Amino acid sequence: MAADPRFFPCAGPQTLATIAAVAGGRLVGEPTHRLAGVASLQAAGPDDVSFIDHRRNLPLLKASKAGAVVLPEELLGELPDGTAAVVVGSAYLGFTRVAQLFHPAPAPVPGIHATAVVAPDAEIGAGSEIGPYAVVGAAARLGAGCIIGPHAVIGPGVELGASCRLHPHVTVSHAILGAGVVLHPGVRVGQEGFGLVVGTDGSFETMPQLGKVVIGDGVEVGANSCIDRGSQTDTVIGPGTRIDNLVQIGHNAQLGRGCVIIAMAGISGSAVLGDHVTVAAQAGIAGHLKLGSKARIGAQAGVMQDVPPGTDVVGSPALPVKQFFRAQSLLRRMAQASGQNKTGEKT
């Protein structure tokens, strides 16, 4: 079904010319025709835009009543009669941009809620929205057009670039955030890292965590993820990086540009990730390792040594993909051999 207007206000209708321009595609249809929203192929009606990016969905396309479809050139001939087309190189990317057109991120409602607590020397950028029970600490600085959700806490000295959005119950301390950073509900940034020393009597002493967190422009962090501040150096999250829900990033970790860290992954302290590294769900990266640019870490992998640039690894301990599956094949053959008696019969 189309997006529920109770939760997702729509900026439609939009002309097909505008839709094609936003998608970066070639329009096959009437430029001035207007459509009201976006929907899946199954749910779309004559006033909706949909998309198809793979031939396996051709039956859905044939049955769809969508007014327009975003699709690659090779599927244009499969379009039902009377349906407009927006022909693009990447249908999913093009449709994403169309969906953003109809459902843009909410704009801030400028002002400070009566229940918010804002330090007298905090700087609030023009057009920013400070929600109910939010706290903005001493000497904190917010850029223009920020949205600070209910019960969010911004610690003393923290700096946010323009157009940042902190959802409800986010806490940020000891951190500098670039422009357009989005922190989803329950994110914790800048808390003390896990630094301890064993004392002479076997008890633990906490190493002061004296670094900060530096987050680049356009980073998004999913709900209930944690990014510890540095110990003696800073924890750094490169511009454009996307971090999923329930991710832990330890102190002094350094992430490059455009990394993707997926749910329940853990990156230990002082690990260094190059640009565009992908860490899949539940993978663990040991401390002080280096993962080269465009390395890809498989789900539930345990990475215990450096990974060269562009290398895909899986398993625990993690191995390059081909090496891992050769080892698995050998283990299966050994297990089969051990299950046979001397006459060749299975025991």
Image (cartoon, rainbow, N blue to C red):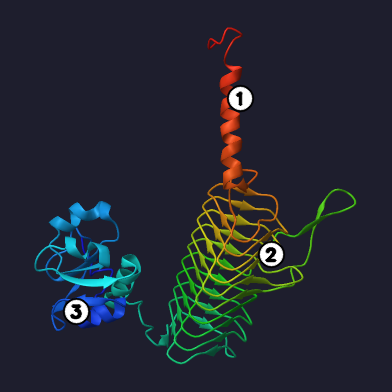
Give the spatial CA distance, label 2 vs label 3: 49 Å
Amino acid type, label 1: Met
Which secondary structure, mark 1?
helix
Q: Position of residue 181 (x, y in %)?
A: 50, 76
Front of the two marks 2 and 3: 3
Above or below, 114 against 240 in this view is below
Q: Quadrant of residue 52?
A: bottom left
Asked whether, in this view, residue 278 is left or right of residue 128, the answer is: right
Front of the two marks 3 and 1: 1
- The answer to whether residue 315 is seen in the rendering is no
Name which residue lies at 13% across and 80% down: 30
Amino acid type, label 3: Leu
Indicate the quadrant containing the C terminus: top left, top right, bottom left or bottom right. Answer: top right
Name which residue lies at 51% across and 57% down: 262
Contact, CB < 8 Å: mark 3 with mark 1? no
Q: Quadrant of residue 36?
A: bottom left
Instruction: Determine which of the numbered discs, if any, sits on residue 251 in the image.
Output: 2
Which secondary structure, mark 2?
loop
Looking at the image, is mark 3 or mark 1 earlier in the sequence? Answer: 3
Give the spatial CA distance, label 3 vs label 1: 62 Å
Q: Position of residue 226 (x, y in %)?
A: 58, 62
Name which residue lies at 64% across and 82% down: 157
Amino acid type, label 2: His
Front residue (pair 54, 14): 54
Q: Which residue is mark 3?
A: 16
Front residue (pair 28, 277): 28
Looking at the image, is mark 2 or mark 3 earlier in the sequence? Answer: 3
Instruction: Determine which of the numbered discs, if any, sits on residue 334 in the image.
Output: 1
Residue projecting furthest to the bottom: 126
Front residue (pair 98, 55): 55
Asked whether, in this view, residue 173 is left or right of residue 194, the answer is: left
Looking at the image, is mark 2 or mark 1 earlier in the sequence? Answer: 2
